[in-house]
Image: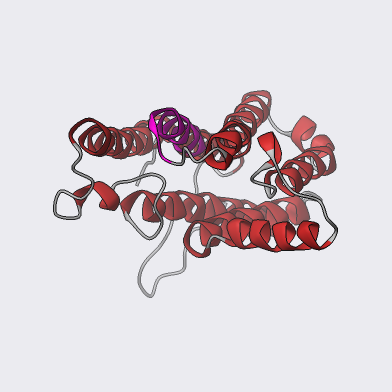
Amino acid sequence: VRVSPKYVFCFLIAISGLLVMFHILGQVSRLGFGHAQLHGLVPLFDLEEETNVPSFWSSCLWLVAGSIAWFAAYRARRDARRDWPHWSGLSIIFYSFGMDETIQFHERMGGFLVRFLQIEWIRPTGFVYYVWTIPALIFALVVFFVYLRFLMALPRDVMRLMVVAGVVFVTGPVGFELLEGPIDEAGGYMNLLYTVYVTCEETLEMAGVCILILALLRYVAVRSPNFQVAVGDTQPPTN
């Protein structure tokens, strides 16, 4: 079975775009016509809500990315390459992000930080109203610098795609939540501007993961171009 990274990317982007379109239609119904439910269809495709279709899709995207990274780690370790711990680390990070889409650990962490800061008489406000964005940005920078040499050693097109994926993804959940904070603080949660920011945030997040999967598939195509899976009692082919 031949898998084209380009076709997989187009498929993932198409599904993500369809979910964004359903979200936009639901928000038009909510904001423009006052119908916030439509028999449950609006919250079912609301990008801001959890445990619905978009959040499940985002979890699936991260699980796909984590599985490809795990496969890259397996092949690297089998071939005695020194980069297998980096791929293993990426696999763990991607799986964790997939779980976070369901359990919303970052929001729980944000609540803990708010309570801690209130104890210290510091009140999160303005662009850092969603205080979890600060440790998230620090984490992103740490991962970038830890993986910098690893990135530089990747094939040029794979490296570029992974950097683009990281920038697009971080711009979504971190960048736009910095803009959403002051609106929520002022009592404008889910007003028109807030909804626009949420739509951009979640669209960039899904787009970033899709680009990441494209990069990972291209890497696998370079490192394991003849990889096959055998089903049955016969010995699987080896490269």
Query: What residue do we see at 70% from left, 63% from top?
Result: 112
Q: Residue at x 46, y 33 (%)?
A: 194
The location of residue 232, given as percent across then percent down, is 35, 72
Query: Principal SS element in the magenta part?
Result: helix
Q: In this view, does 62 lie above or below 112?
A: above
Q: Residue at x 63, y 35 (%)?
A: 178
First to last magenta residue range? 190-205
Q: For residue 204: magenta?
A: yes
Q: Which sits in the foreground, 21 or 128?
A: 128
Q: Picture coordinates of residue 188 (x, y %)?
A: 47, 37
Q: Where is residue 25 in the image (x, y as percent from the top left)?
A: 23, 34
Q: Is residue 149 magenta?
A: no
Q: Nearer the viewer, residue 96 or 48?
A: 48
Q: Can residue 79 be seen in this view?
A: no
118 is higher (above) or lower (below) than 128: below
| Residue 158 at least partly seen | yes
Residue at 31% of width from left, 53% of height from top? 53
